[in-house]
Structures are given as structure tokens and as C-alpha cells.
Amino acid sequence: MRKIRSFVLREGRLTKGQQNALDNHWPVLGLNYQSSSLDLATVFGRSAPVVLEIGFGMGKSLVEMAKNAPDKDFIGIEVHKPGVGACLGDAAAAGLSNLRLFEHDAVEVLNDSIADESLDTVQLFFPDPWHKKRHHKRRIVQPEFVQLLRKKLKIGGVFHMATDWQNYAEHMLEVMQAAPGFQNESASADYVERPAHRPLTKFEQRGQRLGHGVWDLMFKRIS
């Protein structure tokens, strides 16, 4: 779909706990990229609303969301192995059965491993803002990426973004307002209040203390 990647793979060193989590819990909670669509009802052993998060970092908020919404199934995609290991460990410690993880490029997973109209929500929280103007082309929220998400979301499904970079928030809003098939969930036609189901991260709490803003956007697929 695109050759410009929205991430740089920086392989951090794995802690012993992260490596143990990968060794012990990946066989149950891990999903391997494949070139054909997964049957999510088979993956989770049930039919339930599916939330997919792109770039979950260390996975703290993803695990919290999955714990707080046992009636939903969650899929996380992350390219950084230490974050995958940390998330696996926390998910296993919480006894979660409604969470699965990919360690792969999200665009390839969405294109090939996720069936059309199979997702109820796609979450993109605090992606790399690529704040230098010459790097803006690396930002993941671009018109063609949004149309890929449109195909994967059910009608009525929601694309939920959050960023602490105002310039990126404005970029997201501009792209989404021009995107066919989506409707802004904001009553003021721009941003929404942080919904209760998106946990407040330590990083975000620190930003609030320093007076930094955070912008949430929610767009529903309507066609």
C-alpha cells in the first residue's frame, strides 16, 4: 500500500521478564501475521465486538481496557519486541482471555490478516508525530490508510485517535474531515472529550501537569 513506514524499528534490549513472557505466553496470546484473513471468532472462541489498537507501546492501557471490558475482544499490534513482551506479561498476570497481540507492521496486518468489516473499533493513541515538516509524510494518518481502515471497520464502527501534538491533531482532523465514508462524532465538529474507556496514561498525566494538551478524535464509519 505504501513504502514509507510510519515507524522506525529500534530494537531495545529485552528484560528477563519480557523474554520469559514471550517464551511462555506468545503461544496462547500471540498472533502471527498471515497472508489470509483470520477468523476472529475462532481466535477468541466466541463472537464479540472487536477492538484493534495500533501501536500499543508497553501495553499498560491496552491491558487495562481489556480487563475493564470482558464483553469485548482486543487485538494489539506493535513492532517493538520489549513492548510486546511487557504486554504479554501483564495480560497473563491479569488472566486475560480477550486479548491477542501481533508483533508486525500494522498496515500489512490490516491489509492481509484482518477481514473486511470485522472490526468495531480501531484505536490509534499517541502515534509518532513526526513533528519535523519534512517527516510529515511518515505520519500514519493519511488518506489511503484511512480508507484501508474504512474497509476493515463495520458500518457504525469507530476510528478513535489521540495525540498530544496539536499540529498532528489538526492534521488528523483535516484528513478525517475529507475522508469519504466517515462522520465526526464531535458535537463541535472537531475534537471529543477523552472517553472514560481510554485510560489516562502516566505520560498523559505528566503532560497535564505541565500544561500540555491532548486531543481525542472519533470518527464513525457511515458508508
Image: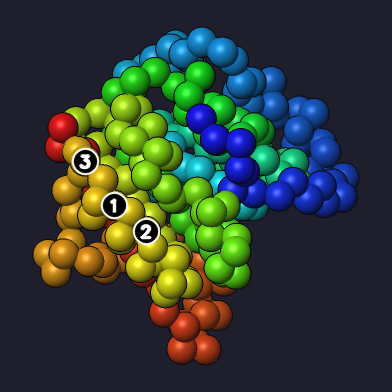
Q: CA distance from mark 2 to mark 3?
A: 14 Å
Of the residues shown, which amino acid type is indicated by label 1?
Met
- Secondary structure category for the residue under label 1: helix
Q: Which mark is residue 176?
A: 1
Please report the residue visible at 75 percent of the width from the left and 36 percent of the height from the top.
21
- Labels 2 and 3 touching (C-beta < 8 A): no
Work out whether 98 lies above or below 42: below
- Residue wearing tag 2: 172
Of the residues shown, which amino acid type is indicated by label 3?
Pro
Residue 93 visible in this rendered orientation of the protein: no
Q: Nearer the viewer, residue 169 or 144?
A: 144
Q: CA distance from mark 3 to mark 1?
A: 8 Å
- Labels 2 and 1 touching (C-beta < 8 A): yes
The outermost residue toward the front is: 134
- Secondary structure category for the residue under label 3: loop
Please report the residue visible at 76 percent of the width from the left and 33 percent of the height from the top.
22
Q: Tell me where residue 81 appears, x and y as whole percent.
A: 74, 41
Pointer 2: residues within 10 angstroms few (<14), some, or many (20+)? Answer: many
- Residue wearing tag 3: 180
Q: Quadrant of residue 143?
A: top left
- Labels 3 and 1 touching (C-beta < 8 A): no
Work out whether 207 lies above or below 28: below
Please report the residue visible at 14 percent of the width from the left and 69 percent of the height from the top.
188
Work out whether 3 lies above or below 10: above
Q: Tell me where residue 194 appears, x and y as whole percent.
A: 32, 65
Q: Tell me where residue 203 appears, x and y as whole percent.
A: 57, 71
